[in-house]
Image (spheres, rainbow, N blue to C red):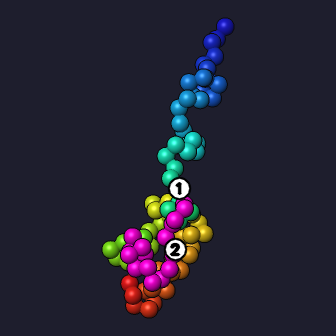
Amino acid sequence: MKKRKKNFKSSKNSLNKLSLFQKNDGRFSRKCPFSVKNAPVIDYKNISLLQKYITETNKIITSKISNVSLGKQKKLAREIKKAQILGIL
């Protein structure tokens, strides 16, 4: 009789290894800096805050890099654009 090879999915060791397509268990996730207590208010007049979230070429940093939540990222982008239009940034 021929021996069958073990299926990779059924091996116990494969459960311990992380796959490229699996989500991590959240150990490395950080909280949104605008969702904590005493967080700074996102406003177009707060230049020092807005400059933290733009690059040297005046592009807005993505939320994946800055860990800002989706709603706050939209508000942040809106305020940055408002400050750029007014010539503050």
Q: Residue at x 52, y 65 (%)?
A: 38
Q: Residues within 10 Å of mark 2 (few under 14, many from 20)?
A: few
Percent of width and height locating residue 32: 53, 60
Q: Is residue 37 magenta?
A: yes
Q: Amino acid at mark 1?
A: Lys
Which type of secondary structure does the marked residue at label 1 adopt? loop
Residue type (three-letter) at the residue carrying disc 2: Val
Cα separation, mark 2 vs mark 1, equals 16 Å
The residue wearing badge 1 is 31
Looking at the picture, does residue 59 appear above or below residue 83? Answer: above
| Position of 25 relative to 76 (above/below) | above
Q: Which residues are magenta?
A: 36-52
Q: Residue 69 falls in which quadrant of the image?
A: bottom right
**Main secondary structure type of the part rendered in magenta:** loop
Residue 45: horizontal and vertical position, in percent?
Answer: 45, 84
Q: Can you name the residue that lies furthest to the left here?
A: 56
Q: Which mark is residue 41?
A: 2
What residue is at 53 percent from the left and 80 percent from the top?
A: 78
Q: Is residue 27 above or below residue 87?
A: above
Mark 2, mark 1: which one is toward the viewer? 2
Specify whether 26 is left or right of 89: right
Q: Nearer the viewer, residue 13 or 33?
A: 33
Q: Which mark is residue 68?
A: none
